[in-house]
Image (tube, helix red, strand yellow):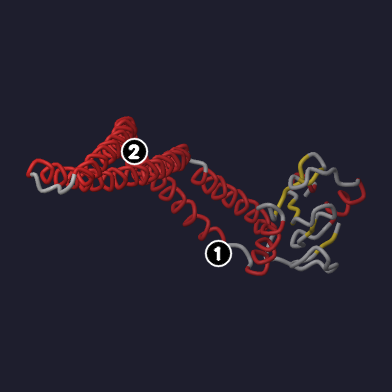
């Protein structure tokens, strides 16, 4: 077991104003743990989980809506192109047929060539119409899917907005409570020697939020390791104003007067 005011490696005991100041350090530790619990509660709020899950769901739906809309745009573009081709082919057929009816087709061979072209163009127009029908058949379920996705997206967006409101309320409630505890902590910290507070803060940052521990049943309450009998004896014999560190974990040890036999 080592004794120091700053780090456990220092061997010289550093005096502090009085033993109650060490007891205050334990109170400060409890308040800090209460703030840690509030911070954890704030991070793990069920409302925050709901917001995260709903946000992920909305992002997924939004992506699916985007994919469906992109697919629909491609089909509509193909449909427009086919419409234009069909209109062009139909116009060509009408022109040829008009020439054939007007008697201006020319020779028999010319008329036969025009008839063959009309037949070929008519076949082409049927193929185009078949392709258009396929696109229309593909668009119908896609439009239904897109409508469903948008409705689901809208519903999830409403749930997300509500969940965010609930999260804001729950967060504000915890923040209000933490503000009260933090104010009490500031008042308590003013009663502890600055150098002791600084050492405690360094240890707390390194040792999982616990920089000061009391002795319980002959063990350090920080690391829960049993202190050797000789160490316990030296701890009981230490000056009331000495800062003593646990040899096992380095935390500041505080022994109450009744434990020390004083």
Query: In the displayed structure, would residue 60 be above or below residue 199?
Result: above
* Crowding near the residue tagged with mark 1, few <14, some 14–19, many ≥20 C-alpha atoms within 10 Å: few
- The percent position of residue 120, horizontal first and vertical second, equals 29, 40
Q: Looking at this view, is 223 or 10 the one in front?
A: 223
Upstream in sequence: badge 2 or badge 1: 2
Task: Give the SS element for disc 1.
Answer: loop
What residue is at 26 percent from the left and 38 percent from the top? 125
Q: Looking at this view, is 40 or 115 the one in front?
A: 115
Instruction: Give the number of callouts.
Output: 2
Query: In the displayed structure, would residue 187 be above or below residue 115?
Result: below
Res 196 seen here: yes
Res 147 seen here: no
Residue position for label 1: 190
- On residue 25, which mark appears? none
Residue position for label 2: 153
Q: Looking at this view, is 222 or 261 the one in front?
A: 222
Residue 147, quarter of the rendered image: top left
Q: Distance between the residues labelled 2 and 1?
A: 53 Å
Residue 140, quarter of the rendered image: top left
């Amino acid at each position: 077991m080592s004794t120091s005011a700053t780090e456990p490696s220092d061997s010289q005991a550093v005096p502090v104003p009085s033993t109650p100041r060490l007891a205050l350090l334990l109170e400060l530790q409890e308040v800090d743990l209460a703030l840690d619990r509030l911070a954890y509660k704030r991070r793990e709020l069920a409302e925050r989980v709901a917001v995260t899950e709903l946000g992920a769901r909305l992002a997924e739906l939004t992506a699916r809506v985007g994919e469906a809309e992109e697919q629909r745009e491609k089909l509509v573009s193909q449909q427009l192109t086919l419409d234009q081709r069909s209109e062009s082919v139909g116009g060509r057929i009408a022109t040829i047929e008009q020439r054939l009816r007007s008697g201006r087709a020319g020779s028999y061979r010319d008329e036969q060539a025009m008839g063959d072209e009309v037949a070929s163009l008519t076949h082409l127009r049927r193929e185009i119409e078949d392709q258009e029908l396929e696109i229309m058949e593909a668009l119908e379920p896609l439009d239904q899917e897109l409508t469903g996705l948008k409705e689901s997206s809208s519903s999830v967006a409403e749930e997300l907005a509500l969940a965010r409101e609930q999260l804001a309320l729950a967060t504000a409630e915890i923040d209000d409570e933490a503000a009260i505890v933090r104010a009490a902590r500031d008042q308590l910290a003013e009663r502890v020697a600055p150098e002791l507070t600084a050492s405690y803060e360094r240890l707390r940052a390194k040792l999982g939020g616990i920089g000061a521990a009391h002795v319980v049943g002959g063990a350090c309450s920080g690391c829960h390791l049993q202190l050797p009998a000789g160490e316990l004896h030296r701890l009981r014999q230490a000056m009331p104003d000495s800062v003593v560190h646990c040899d096992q974990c380095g935390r500041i040890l505080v022994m109450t007067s009744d434990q020390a036999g004083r």
